[in-house]
């Protein structure tokens, strides 16, 4: 077999040489989040005229792929995303990208049993002295992809942090077919920290009141979860634990403020458990070779049964709409696709299984249309075409700036009453009228 350096030299290729293995009709995986194979993408685009019907998958595309730019007719490349980003939303509007529905904690079986993968392009860090390449900030489904793919090509990006496990955070050179050294070593995308509004901070303060010392935290993406993190960093809470899907900058703030210790967790004690990270250089520098961070495949981090093994799990996620039945929509506005199921469903279920756990869906009470009209985000029914992310039977705690309600064990009329009472006061009467038409408003119901 030879030494690891001999194997390295034997398997080293330019991007143009490596992509020659892709054939018409193949399925190709591109990587995830801020770890995506840009050099290999550019090289594959050059082969456009030689190929037809090459099907590509990515998780949350964070750059404009060359294979999409060069083929607006989609005769050569069919681009798909497991979880939409701003970029893929724009591409879908031009019919250049399709969504793959995914219950995130089931991704391992999705890949192993149902997703054909002919070639994997997976970004990694530089090889260590033992012959291991680290998959950086995006364990997620990459570890499953590397197990399944018929041909494995790694794209070495020396800018990526080496993220410790956990589990399956690395791949050995003996399991790789080809190595490509990135000629650009692109700096990882710095996700802007969104400014918080007064509404975000009010909702965050309500959630913070529900937290205790020793709580185990999951934060979703967005300004409001970041507002919670900022408040925790300034609070006097002790021994916060982390078991999350996504690691973001606010975890660094909480850790450096002494709030996060992970000492009271029931599993992975002492570790901040996550499956992918997106943030700024502050986060990526913190993660680099840091044993307090533990990278795991999503089948572990997001399994509701695993989540529930920790006590006092606090799951905090955003939504687009909630209807009076308690259905939560976080993926689309009507037929306009926005995001994906992600880990919201997983952590709502997992927090419910946790002793003392609480799963929050946090939503501002209103949205403002382009013409200035104020509309309720608590709606009688979801807009036509809207995708349900959390079914009404699983919804747990809904929170707006006007309060929160636990939906468990509430009948349809109790849900309508509770949700209308945390809607915007100016829009409650109209919601009552609609609830009456829907026969979910009784004579005992009242507006506080």
Image (tube, helix red, strand yellow):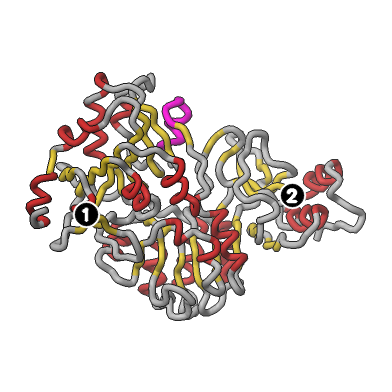
Question: Which sits earlier in the primary sequence, circle 2 or circle 1?
Answer: 1
Image height of 40 relative to 412, above or below: above
Residue 82 seen in the figure = yes
Residue 90 highlighted magenta (yes or no)? yes
Q: Which mark is residue 426?
A: none
Q: Which mark is residue 125?
A: 1
Give the residue displayed 33% in from the left and 59% down from the top: 168
Confirm or deny contact between disc 2 and disc 1 (CB under 8 A). no
Q: Is residue 220 left or right of residue 38?
A: right
Disc 1 residue crowd, few under 14, some 14–19, many 20+, Cα 10 Å: many
Image height of 190 relative to 387, above or below: below
Q: Is residue 331 left or right of residue 80?
A: right
Q: Which residue is mark 2?
A: 325
Residue 316 appears at what percent x and percent y? 54, 61
Question: What stretch of residues is rendered in magenta?
Answer: 86-97
The one nearer the camera, 204 or 66, is 66
Disc 2 residue crowd, few under 14, some 14–19, many 20+, Cα 10 Å: many
């Amino acid at each position: 077999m030879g030494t690891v350096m001999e194997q390295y030299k034997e398997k080293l290729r330019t991007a143009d040489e490596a992509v020659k293995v892709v054939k018409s009709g193949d399925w190709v995986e591109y990587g995830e989040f801020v770890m995506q194979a840009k050099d290999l993408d550019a090289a594959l685009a050059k082969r456009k005229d030689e190929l037809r019907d090459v099907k590509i998958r990515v998780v949350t595309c964070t750059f404009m792929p060359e294979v999409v730019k060069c083929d607006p007719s989609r005769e050569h490349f069919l681009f798909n995303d497991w979880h939409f980003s701003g970029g893929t939303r724009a591409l879908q509007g031009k019919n250049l990208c399709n969504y793959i529905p995914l219950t995130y904690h089931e991704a391992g079986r999705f890949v192993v049993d149902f997703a054909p993968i002919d070639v994997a392009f997976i970004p990694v860090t530089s090889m260590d002295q033992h012959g291991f390449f680290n998959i950086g900030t995006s364990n997620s489904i990459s570890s499953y992809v590397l197990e399944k793919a018929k041909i494995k090509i790694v794209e070495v990006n020396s800018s990526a942090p080496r993220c410790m496990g956990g589990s399956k955070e690395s791949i050995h050179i003996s399991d790789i077919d080809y190595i490509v050294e990135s000629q650009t070593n692109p700096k990882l995308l710095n996700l802007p920290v969104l400014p918080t509004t007064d509404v975000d901070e009010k909702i965050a303060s309500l959630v913070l009141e529900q937290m205790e010392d020793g709580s185990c935290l999951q934060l979703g993406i967005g300004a409001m979860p970041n507002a919670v993190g900022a408040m925790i960093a300034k609070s006097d809470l002790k021994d916060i634990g982390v078991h999350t899907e996504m690691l973001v900058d606010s975890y660094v703030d909480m850790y450096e403020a002494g709030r996060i210790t992970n000492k009271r967790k029931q599993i992975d004690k002492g570790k901040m458990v996550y499956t992918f990270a997106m943030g700024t250089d502050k986060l990526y520098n913190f993660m680099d070779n840091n044993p307090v961070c533990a990278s795991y495949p999503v089948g572990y981090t997001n399994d509701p049964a695993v989540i529930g093994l920790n006590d006092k799990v606090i799951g905090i996620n955003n939504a687009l709409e909630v209807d009076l039945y308690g259905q939560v929509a976080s993926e689309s506005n009507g037929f306009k696709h926005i995001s994906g199921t992600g880990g919201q469903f997983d952590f709502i279920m997992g927090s419910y299984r946790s002793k003392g756990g609480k799963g929050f869906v946090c939503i501002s009470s209103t949205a403002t249309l382009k013409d200035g009209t104020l509309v309720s985000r608590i709606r009688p029914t979801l807009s036509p075409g809207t995708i349900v992310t959390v079914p009404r039977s699983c919804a747990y705690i809904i929170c707006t700036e006007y309060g929160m309600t636990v939906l468990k064990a509430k009948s349809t009329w109790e849900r309508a009453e509770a949700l209308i009472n945390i809607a915007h006061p100016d829009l409650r009467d109209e919601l009552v009228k609609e609830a009456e038409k829907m026969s979910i408003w009784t004579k005992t119901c009242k507006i506080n």
